[in-house]
Structure formats: structure tokens, C-alpha cells
Image (cartoon, grey):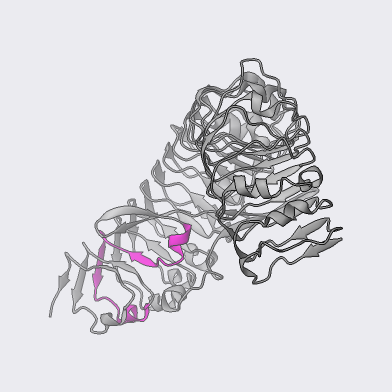
Amino acid sequence: MSLDLSNNHLNGKIREDSNLPFHLETLSISSNFLEGGIPKSFGNACALHSLRMEDNKLSVEFSIIIHHLSGCARYSLEVLYLHMNEINGTLIDLSMFTSLRVLSIGENKLSGKILKNIQFPPQLEELDIQSNSLNGVFTDYHFVNVTKLSYLDLSNNPLTLTFTQNWIPPFQLSSIRLKSCLLGTFPKWLRKQNKYDELDISNSKILDMVPRWFWAKLASGNVGSIDISNNSLHGIIPNIFGKNIVDFLILASNQFEGPIPPFLRGSIFLDLSNNNLLDSHSFLCASGPEKILYQLDLAHNHLSGQIPDCWSHFKSLAYLDLSHNKFSGNIPTSLGLLLGLQALLLRNNNLTHEIPFSLRRCTKLVMLDMSNNNLSGQIPAWIGSEMQELQILSLGSNNFNGILPLQICYLKSIQIFDLSLNNLSGKIPTCINNFTSMVNKTFSSDYGRHGYFINISDFRTYHLYDLNAFLMWKGSEQIFKTTELLLLKGIDLSSNNFSEEIPVEIENLVELISLNLSRNNFIGQIPSNIGNLKSLEFLDLSRNQFIG
């Protein structure tokens, strides 16, 4: 017998004299507004094997819930979902629940120290206590006799994991989530885990070298995602024989150095940003079949020389970030082969010459950021006529010259338009009021999060990514993240040689938040209806030649 009352508007406390039917096996009261705790009578439901009360407002101590369930239900209960509540207290011994297979109590308000002598039920398969405030030390003693555990999520707790030197876990995990726990060294016990599809040990204060056996695992198992970012892992990533087959691999924000090894190319998503990597040529240009990489982030490294002109291997790319490196010379023409590219970030390098004509084929670009380089020539007219999905165009701090082409007005979706600190001249086109997104209110459904479809044989999914944009804001350059970009609409043409009058059409851009036209040669009067721009939070018209 089952009773499902989930996804209603039930509220208040469950009455203490509530009695469950004698033959009730499953009870779901999830996704309501229930408060308090669980009546003691629930523990007398001797047939109960599944209790789901996640996503409510339960606020009692965890030990009281366990006490109320410790009647004959402790022998039958197999599944207990209590996550996304306000349950407090600390974790207690659960070994009395001899049939319990699933315990999910993440995203609550548990706190306090893990006691040394508590143990988990021997039948436990899934343990989720993530996103609480539990502290203390987990040791191998806590997992004695837990041979069936396959899902472990301790993430986002200030927990220390200290296992004996040669501990061999009695279980094989499929999902290992230890983000923001305190590990200190690279976990040796992972060497004996051969079935995991997901591993997250990011932000775990690991100061260590990654052992070679771990890199070898990338080429030997069918792993979905690995995240070891935001640690102090160092050393050279070896080029293991074989191909990395980890779909989502995040090695960012560590201290890896040396060249990027070619074997890493097998991923769909690869993040190597914020390291000390020196060379990308072998990684990008080694021979082999076309790669399935959709997102590649190499930002904030020490990559130098010309950007390798080998992008014909990477035609699936939707997102490419090479910013904040030391690349020099031309932008490679083969980038124009990336017809599905949505975001191209080359900011803060030493790139020179003109924007290559081949990029006109990248018509799906949503963001193009080439700021802080030494690029020259004119702003290509085809940026406006061919890239009409652009929402962020940042070409500031270069050596572009000439006038703004009229085709720039085709950018109806533009949110950030930054051409500051160049040598542009002439006038602002009167068709600027064709920047529709700055005229009309943009809703999150029109802008919002960005993503791309991954379509590889039997693997199909939609993956979201974040866009971060820089803009001079109230005197200093600031970075704005995806959620902030929903609201931000800005034009920065400062520090150029623009002249003539500001076109009166600018007063139609009523959704502008930031307008910077300073340090130019504008003349005449400031448009009389500029006060229509009621959303403006930042306006700079200084250092021009206005009158009146």
C-alpha cells in the first residue's frame, strides 16, 4: 500500500496522534510546507520501507526524528529522504536501522562534530549529507561493514577525512562527492575505486602532486565527470598512452605546469584555467581524428607564442576561452571553421594585426571579447551583418581605427557594446536606436543562461555555461557574471576620437544602465531628452567639447 501527498500545499505540523495504516509501505509527503518533526506513531508502521519528506520546512533535531522512527519501523525502513529542510542537531549512530539503504539529509542545518563511535547501517547504498555544517573527522571506522555503498555525498561540510594509510574501502562507489571537505593530500584510497562515474574533490585544500595512477585511470575507465579544481595540486600532467575518455574534466585553479598533454583531448568539456601551463601546441595540433570537444577553457595560464592554427580538429567547439595568456601574432584563420562557436574570448593577450575575415562564418557567436590586445585595422562591417546573435561585443583597449560601419546597427540583441580605448573616429551612427535590446526590456527568457546541445552517438544532452563580461563601471573595470548580465546594458565608446554631435536617437535607448562617451571630441549640445534614459546608473560625458 502506498500514499503519495507530495507537491501539494500542506502546511503546519503533522499531528502527534496521526496513525499510519498498518499495511502502508511507502509514504511521500515531499515538496509541501510541513513544519516541526515526525510523529512518534510513524515508528510503529511496521511495514513502512520508504518515507519521503524532502523539500519541506521540518525544523526538529535529527536525533528526535531517528528516535521517533526507532520502533518496529527501524527493521523495515529502507529509504529515508529528508533533504532540503531545516533539520538541526548532529549526525548520530544509525546502525540500528538494519535495512536502511538510502539516507538523504543534505541541505539542512545539521552541525556539530561527528562522533568517533557512530556507524552507518550495513545495507546502506546511498549517503547524502551535503550542504550542512557538520565538522569533525570521518575515519574508516565509520564505514566498517558498509559493503554496498555506491553513492557518497559529503560535500560542502567542513569535514576532515582521515583514513589509515593503506585503507581499502569495503565498497565500490559510483558517485564520490567530497567538494569543500578537508582532504589535505590526494586520497590514496581512490586507487581501489574502479566503478565511479563521478568524482568531485574540488576545493578540498589538497597540497600534493597527482599520482600517475590517477592520470592512467582517465584513460582506462568510463567516467562521466571529474572535478579536482581549486586545490594546490602541482607538477606536470603526463601524456598517458591512450585517450582521456572523461566527458567533463575540470582541473582549473591549481598549479599544474609544463605543456598540455594531447591525451586530454578526449573530453567534451575541459577546463584547465588558472594554472601555470606553458604550451598548447601539441595538445591542439597533434594528429588524429576530429575531436568532440564542445567547451575548452585555457584562460589565466602562461601560454605564449602564436595561437596554434589547428582548429580544424575541433569543429564541435561552442565555447573557447584563451584569455589572460601571453599569445602574440595573428588570430589564426582556422578559428573561422568553428561554425558552432557561441563564445570566443581572447582578452588580455598580445595579439596583433586585423580581425581575420574568416571569423565572419562564426554566425552563432553570442560573445566576442578581444579586448586588451594590440589589434588594428577597422571594425569589420561583417560583425554587424553576419553576427546578429551577439549580445556581448568587447573590443576595447586595442588600436582599431576608422569609423563605425553602419552595419553595426544590425546588432539587435547587443547588451554590452565596448569599443573604448581605440583610435575610432567619425560620428555615432543615427541607426543606433536599432539596438533593440537597449530600447525594449529584455526578459530572462530572451537572454538568460546560455548553452549548447551535445550530440555524440548515444550521448545527448543540453549543457549550460556562464558568460562573464568586463565593463568600466563608475571609474574602475569590473566583472559582471551571468545573473548580473540579465540586467546590465552598457555602451562604452570612451577614449576614442569620435566627433560631431551625439545623435538624438540615443535617447531611445531607455534600457541603458551604463553610458560612457568620455574622452572624445563630441561637439554641440547634449541631447535635450537624454533624461529619458531613466534606467541609467552610470553616465560619463566628460572631456568633450560640448556647449550650451
Q: Is residue 157 above or below residue 469?
A: above
Front one among 199 and 398? 199
Question: Residue 403 in magenta?
Answer: no
Quadrant where the N terminus is found in the figure: bottom right
Q: Is residue 320 above or below residue 194?
A: below
Front one among 151 and 513? 151
Q: Is residue 432 left or right of residue 456?
A: left
Residue 316 in view here: no
Q: Which quadrant of the structure image shows residue 515? A: bottom left
**Start-end of magenta stretch:** 482-510
Q: Which quadrant of the structure image shows residue 241? A: top right
Q: Is residue 289 above or below residue 411?
A: above
Q: Residue at image x 40%, y 65%? A: 488
Q: Residue at image x 68%, y 38%? A: 94
Image x and y of residue 224, in percent: 70, 40
Image x and y of residue 121, in percent: 73, 35
